[in-house]
């Protein structure tokens, strides 16, 4: 949904895995930004109707970017800074208390 | 956890940063806790990095100002807890000879919980964009103008085409010009400011002229957009359409209904105080008719109705970055006086130039509030529009609960789950209040917000458990 500006500075490049696909972003980017750059059409589905959603506010107040980061569910993707090798998964439906 | 700070500041935008600098100048032991990994808040997000790699200069001098503020903060000696989610603050009575309150603020970072204690708490939690409930606003590809601008500032990212902006206020104009200057393209710009709104704003023009540079900047942005060749039109009944993701934007102009292909649709209808924490901590709220938003009541020193708790910057009422910066300094003076660290005379003397500066920057606000007051359909959307994104409750669902006898926001929440999802009402409470007011004929001021309960941000039991370890250490 988003693309990087064509003149990237020499920020450290970081590779994360979004649903298993390698995505290269910059150090300091958020997990939500990585998903928006990944080409995937949505980042979660709702618990109520299963409707697809994507990041909406990017500042921590809408909770639409809830995702699974390195196995941790329901993380606010816009508040998580990427790390090399981070595993990001889209969060489909609700979470189980015990899994 | 034995240390007790004089001042704990939550929020690293202009108000929080300036408050930390002022407090440190007065030798208050200060800590600033913020969600972001670097100082700046939303308005100056990632400004240090952007200054280093040249992006800041391309985004303009108003943004660049944040770099010097961040620098002053880094040098001021206050402790800094970055990348932290505050999930609760609690007040306890202080010991003998102590000020009457002591705060414990709990937060998590990287899955670990920690706490700090302080004698005075300052909330500088800034603003959030007003929710823009339209048909299809939950479709992937629909987001706020502010979100797109944050992606630009912090990740150097531009939306994929075709891009539409639909909204009202200074931010869409600013972002549009930034996008175009960086090589992005806009398919169209829909101005949702109701026609004739300038007539309501006109009486406030003399005040606005006192802020001539700001006014001139707005006119210049508008001119840049006009000259760019991007189609600008006044329209209403904006609708996002698509199956599973945004595919088109539909709107009604004076000449009829149009539908255009869209990959990204950016919405904006102004900003409102991000007063979630202030509400949860019991600060008395006031309805601001001009800004169509609730805000915490604060006195001339930013003190709230709760002892030992101040609210400064946009969190206490929208004034913009410069007003927030000065407000943060004034709040720090107020806190220092309350803690007995400066006398009344020096507090008042130090605040005089700050108040003059604030007055200058604040004079344009009534003009902006009147000009960009949101259209009624933004505040009270049609019945089939989702009000609560998390629990998928429509405006009609709220009306139905009211007709079944729910008398206020807390009851509607119980009936419908509106406001019960992860965002805890941050996106639906403004709509909830307006729709209840509209359904019952009460003023919005009397309806209020649903009660906000802890934790302020969701926290896992595992993260909570790490606190026990810390206490034992």
Image (cartoon, coloured by chain):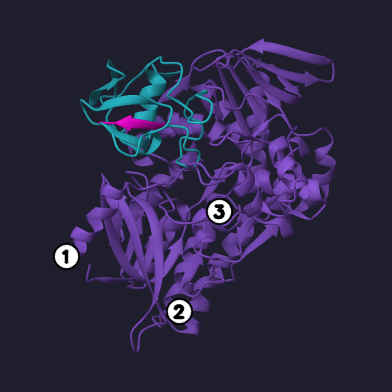
Chain colours: A cyan, B purple
> Which residue, given by chain and number where applicable, does mark 2 sit on?
B337
Residue B428 point in image, percent of width and height: 61, 42
SS label for mark 1: helix
Query: Real-space Cα distance between discs 1 and 3?
Result: 38 Å
Disc 1 vs disc 3: which is toward the camera?
1
What is the crowding at mark 1: few (fewer than 14 residues within 10 Å), some, or many (at least 20)?
few
Q: Are marks 2 and 1 on the same chain?
A: yes
The residue to which callout 3 is attached is B314
* Among the two numbered marks 3 and 2 on one chain, the one whose residue lies closer to the N terminus: 3
Residue at 42%, 82% (x, y): give it: B100
Relative horizontal placement of residue B213, taking residue B453 as reference (left or right): right
Check residue A67 for magenta coloring. Answer: yes
Residue B183, relative to residue B217: is it above or below? above
Q: Classify the position of the N terminus of chain B by image quarter.
A: bottom left
Pick the front one: B208 or B14: B14
B318 inside magenta stretch: no
Residue in the picture at 40% in, 14% down? A39
Q: Nearer the viewer, mark 2 or mark 1?
A: 1
> Considering only order in the chain, which callout, 3 or 1, is on the residue closer to the N terminus?
3
Residue furthest to the left in view is B473
Residue B376: x %, y % from top left: 77, 39
> Residue B138: image x %, image y %?
57, 27
The chain holding disc 1 is B
Magenta residues?
A: A66-70
- For label 3, the crowd category at 10 Å Cα-Cα, with few meaning under 14, some 14 to 19 and many 20 or more, is many
| Residue B62 to residue B15: above or below | above
Determine which quarter of the picture holds residue B170: top right
What residue is disc 1 on?
A: B472
User: Residue B216: image x %, image y %?
Assistant: 66, 39
């Amino acid at each position: 949904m988003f693309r990087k500006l064509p003149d990237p500075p020499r920020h450290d490049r970081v590779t994360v895995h979004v649903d298993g696909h390698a995505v290269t972003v910059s150090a300091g980017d958020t997990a939500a930004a990585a998903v928006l750059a990944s080409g995937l059409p949505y980042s979660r589905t709702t618990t109520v109707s299963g409707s697809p959603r994507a990041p909406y506010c990017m500042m921590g107040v809408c909770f639409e970017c809830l995702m699974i980061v390195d196995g941790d569910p329901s993380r606010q993707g816009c508040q998580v800074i990427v790390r090399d090798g981070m595993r990001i998964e889209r969060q489909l439906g609700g979470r189980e208390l015990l899994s | 956890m034995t240390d007790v700070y004089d001042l704990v500041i939550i929020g690293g935008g202009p108000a929080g940063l300036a408050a930390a600098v002022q407090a440190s100048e007065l030798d208050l032991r200060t800590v600033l806790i913020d969600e972001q990994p670097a100082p700046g808040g939303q308005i100056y997000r990632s400004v240090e990095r952007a200054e280093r790699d040249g992006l800041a200069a391309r985004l303009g001098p108003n943004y660049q100002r944040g770099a010097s503020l961040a620098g002053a903060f880094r040098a001021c000696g206050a402790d800094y807890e970055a990348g932290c989610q505050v999930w609760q603050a609690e007040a306890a009575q202080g010991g003998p000879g102590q000020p009457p309150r002591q705060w414990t603020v709990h937060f998590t970072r990287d899955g670990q919980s920690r706490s700090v204690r302080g004698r005075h708490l300052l909330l500088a939690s800034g603003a959030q964009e007003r929710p823009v409930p339209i048909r299809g606003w939950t479709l992937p590809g629909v987001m706020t103008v502010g979100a797109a601008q944050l992606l630009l500032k912090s990740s150097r990212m531009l939306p994929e085409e075709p891009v539409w902006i639909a909204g009202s206020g200074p931010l869409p104009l600013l972002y549009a010009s930034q996008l175009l200057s960086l090589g992005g393209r806009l398919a169209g710009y829909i101005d949702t400011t109701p026609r004739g709104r300038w007539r309501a704003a006109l009486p406030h023009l003399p005040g606005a002229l006192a802020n001539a540079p700001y006014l001139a900047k707005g006119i210049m942005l508008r001119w840049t957009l006009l000259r760019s060749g991007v189609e600008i039109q006044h329209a209403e009944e904006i609708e996002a359409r698509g199956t599973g993701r945004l595919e088109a934007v539909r709107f009604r102009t004076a000449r009829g209904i149009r539908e255009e292909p869209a990959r990204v649709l950016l919405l904006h209808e102004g900003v409102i105080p991000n007063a979630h924490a202030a509400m949860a901590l019991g600060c008395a709220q006031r309805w601001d008719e001009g800004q169509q938003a609730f805000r915490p009541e604060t006195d001339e020193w930013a003190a709230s109705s709760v002892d030992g708790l101040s609210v400064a910057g946009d969190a206490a009422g929208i004034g913009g970055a410069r007003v927030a910066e000065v407000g943060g300094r004034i709040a720090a003076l107020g806190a220092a006086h309350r803690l007995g660290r400066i006398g009344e005379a020096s507090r008042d003397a130090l605040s005089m130039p700050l108040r003059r500066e604030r007055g200058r920057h604040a004079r344009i606000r009534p003009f902006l509030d009147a000009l960009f007051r949101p259209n009624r359909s933004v505040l009270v959307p049609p019945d089939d529009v989702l009000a609560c994104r998390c629990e998928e409750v429509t405006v009609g669902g709220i009306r139905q609960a009211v007709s079944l006898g729910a008398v206020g926001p807390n009851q509607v929440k119980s009936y419908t789950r509106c406001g019960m999802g992860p965002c805890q009402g941050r996106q639906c409470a403004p709509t909830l209040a307006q729709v209840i007011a509209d359904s019952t004929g009460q003023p919005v001021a009397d309806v209020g917000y649903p009660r906000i309960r802890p934790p302020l941000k969701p926290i896992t039991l595992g993260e909570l458990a790490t606190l026990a370890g810390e206490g034992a250490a």
